[in-house]
Amino acid sequence: MEKAAHPKAVWWLAFFCFIESSFFPIPPHPLLGLMCLAEPKKAIRFAVIATVSSVLGGLLGYAIGYFLYEAVGAWMIGMLGLTESFPVAACYIREQGALAVFFAAGTPVPFKLMTITAGFIEMNLLTFTLAAIAGRALIFMIVGILFQVFGAPIKAIIDKYLGAVTTVFVVLVVGGFIAFTQLAGGNDDATSENACDAVTEVRGA
């Protein structure tokens, strides 16, 4: 708690959020929670820093996938144990676009996998950035706002329910978008999402 209240803790938060979005395996959420617990009045500020840093890190991951996949990206994916998940992620991003990135950014799905994959398949950069901002803001700003409003007592509730609540919320949002697309006469292939789960190789970007 003492270290979390230290002035340099903000820089560590920004650093960990940045690298977690591109290659670091440990999520920054515990550090954000401790800092908000140590200084609840600055919770929203911390959440904004986490969001911005994470999105910038996501852009680094995108650049690795776009420019350096063969040299660096494939090694990173393998080091993180996500090699088998890479073709699946590529399929989901091609099929769902921004929704896939938003879902990964706002849930426990490894965001670094999606950032590198999005760059590799050359997803539209603006679409990727907006989806990343929305998803990361969802997961981090909820923490910041709850601490700002309720203070330290909310920590126990966050520790127990945040992952489940945000996951359910994102699922509902994604489900709403899919339902709207179907009603609007969009893609009628209801099995495309399930088909991605069986993908074992990445087709051309």
Image (cartoon, helix red, strand yellow):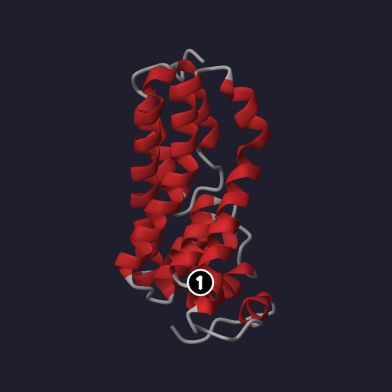
Viewer-nearest residue: 101 or 168:
168
Instruction: Give the residue drawn at x 59%, y 57%.
Output: 172
Would you say residue 35 is visible in this rendering?
Answer: no
x, y percentage for residue 161?
66, 36
With respect to residue 177, does 150 lie above or below?
above
With respect to residue 36, does 16 lie above or below?
below
Q: Amino acid at mark 1?
A: Phe
Splitting the image into 4 quarters, where does residue 199 fall? bottom right
x, y percentage for residue 66?
37, 71
Residue pushed farthest top?
2
Q: For mark 1, does the 10 Å Cα neighbourhood hold few (<14), some (14 to 19), or many (20 or more) residues?
A: few
Would you say residue 191 is visible in this rendering?
Answer: yes
Q: Secondary structure at mark 1?
A: helix
Instruction: Give the residue drawn at x 58%, y 75%.
Output: 87
x, y percentage for residue 80?
59, 56
Viewer-nearest residue: 136 or 161:
161
Residue pushed farthest left?
126
Residue for badge 1 = 180
Give the quarter of the figure containing the C terminus: bottom left
Indicate left or right for 103 with 199 as reference. Answer: left
Indicate left or right for 144 with 195 as reference. Answer: left
Indicate left or right for 72 with 161 as reference. Answer: left
Instruction: Give the residue drawn at x 51%, y 51%.
Output: 106
x, y percentage for residue 43?
41, 26
Instruction: Give the residue drawn at x 66%, y 44%.
Output: 164
Viewer-nearest residue: 54 or 41:
41
With respect to residue 175, does 10 lie above or below?
above
Total number of numbered discs in the rendering:
1
